[in-house]
Amino acid sequence: MPKILLFVPLAALWGLIGVLAAQSRPKADLILISGKVWTVNPARPKAEAVAIQGSRILAVGSNQEILDLAGPQTRRIDLQGQAVFPGFIDSHAHFLGLGKEKRQVNLRYAGSWENVVERVAAAAARVPKGTWVLGRGWHQEKWNPKPAVLVAGFPVHDLLSRAVPDHPVLLTHGSGHALLVNARAMELAGISDATPNPPGGEVLRNTRGQAIGVFTENAEDLVWEAYGRDQSRLSPAEREAETIKEIEAADRECLANGITTFHDAGVGFSTLDLYRKMVDAGRIRVRLWAMVNESNEQLRRRLGSYKQIGYGENQLTVRGIKRLLDGALGSRSAWMKEGYADRPGNTGLNTIPLSDLKQTAQIALQNGWQLCVHAIGDRANQELLDLYESILPSPSASESRWRIEHAQHLDPQDIPRFARLGVIAVMQGVHCTSDGPFIVSRLGEKRARSGAYVWRSLLDARARISNGTDAPVEELNPLACFYSSVTRRQGNGEYFYPEQRMTRSEALESYTIQGAYAGFEENIKGSIEPGKLADLVVLSRDIMTVPEEEIPQAEVRMTIIGGQIRFSK
């Protein structure tokens, strides 16, 4: 009898402790249940539900485990089987360029040179004479039919100049590495047939030495300076207002595409000042990770005051320096070890002296910044790896996490060097399938097979790859990039060396945890696990399990950043 009397109070005590523990357990502000949660966390790869408290993930688990964390004020969302992923991290794109594209003539889907001219003429008719008309996205390799007159594969300006004689026209190539302008723009820029090629750039000319209106790499500055003089007529307040509109347009585009962190590949100090101002005002919702693109002189003078890690509750980070070592394959300005197969003797362009780039690398190392250098051709990549190897201290090179932006065409012997040096290959899956139709004609079959977009070879050599779109070069569409990464299927239905495909898990990691690693942020984002930032994307289809051909049909249904639903469809 005494034992029974003792047992009852103990049982009641344990019950009371359980009730008190349940009452003291932290409650979620938002829970997502009945989903297919892909966590990118090896300890628990899949789950049904997620609990969010404030800006962080509180718990990941089964429906019942998460429902136990609900309180009277908890918002509950039944996903009804939709898929949940860590928020997408676009590891290389151009924020202002994306915003500007939304306000220019879109030429990405112009199927011919004549169609380009028609679209530009229509835009010119809507604005006063003398107004600059800007467009972006044309690509001569994607036109059918081709223009009757071509110089080095490019059209001449004559048709455009006749159709639009009274407006200066500036059209950026889809790659961003060439301009096509009309006669009026060349006149305002003071460009004649005698204008010399600047170092690292080319003014394309016909056999009679006449400028055809196409400018590659550093020669683009000849026209951009003329446009800049025109824009200087605006007051500083007017120019800032225009830039704010572009930033807000880019922000909306990111949220609609499930992007929660955007690696902005090269901006100036003044743009960074504006980013910080807008973050303070709550006018930028996507998380920005920015690279500074300024002269070595400016970097020495001002770099120390611009480093930001997680500013504004992890809204803005500035810790990378951006440089361009060469051009692009589309404009035949990528720096190659051998000449282009379709333009013999031309090996592309080196756009910055290696001595200058070495100074940049030393500045980055001395100040603890990441160096992020654009390199597309095999010569550019090899020279850059040589430079990194000469500058980075061994054996701790990987601690610096220096990056090669694009790494599109590699000499096979350089592939193992990425892992050995700890260099991150920041690549764009969609470039492969977008450029694929003309790569063999550019490089020849042997070089294309062994070195073009060799994701499998890099991964097998234990290199890290982070993924992105390079928008506005391509559409800001992580799902299209994911599809290209796992299929390498081109728009014509053909596969571009499919043996170099990523697995779906590798592709997902390249857009989440590897992107976080590329920014020193893997401890706070890139996977769905307790304590990390509640940055999530909900898709209408499970891209990890649906048949391959259904991946492009997936849609972004919800984008959550810091526990806040920033986009919902």
Image: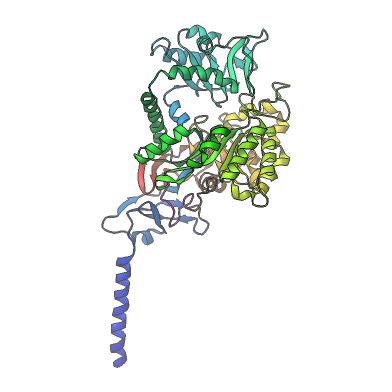
**Does residue 140 appear in the picture of this structure?**
no
Horizontal and vertical percent position of residue 107: 49, 21
Of residues 75 and 288, which is closer to you in this image? 288
Horizontal and vertical percent position of residue 440: 67, 28
Horizontal and vertical percent position of residue 424: 60, 44
Which residue is depicted at the point 29% across and 84% down?
8
Residue 134 included in the magenta stretch of the image: no
Which residue is depicted at the point 43% across and 48% down?
84
* Relative to 317, residue 250 above or below: above
Which quarter of the rendered picture does the N terminus lie within?
bottom left
Residue 533 included in the magenta stretch of the image: yes
Is residue 60 toward the left or the right of residue 469 in the image?
A: left
**Does residue 25 appear in the picture of this structure?**
yes
Of residues 494 and 527, which is closer to you in this image? 527
* Relative to 414, residue 118 above or below: above
Horizontal and vertical percent position of residue 316: 44, 42
Is residue 39 toward the left or the right of residue 346 in the image?
A: left
Of residues 66 and 195, which is closer to you in this image? 195
Residue at the extreme bottom: 1
Which residue is depicted at the point 36% across and 26% down?
237
Which quarter of the rendered picture does the C terminus lie within?
top left
Is residue 425 toward the left or the right of residue 303 in the image?
A: right
| Residue segment shown in magenta | 525-538
* Relative to 512, residue 206 above or below: above
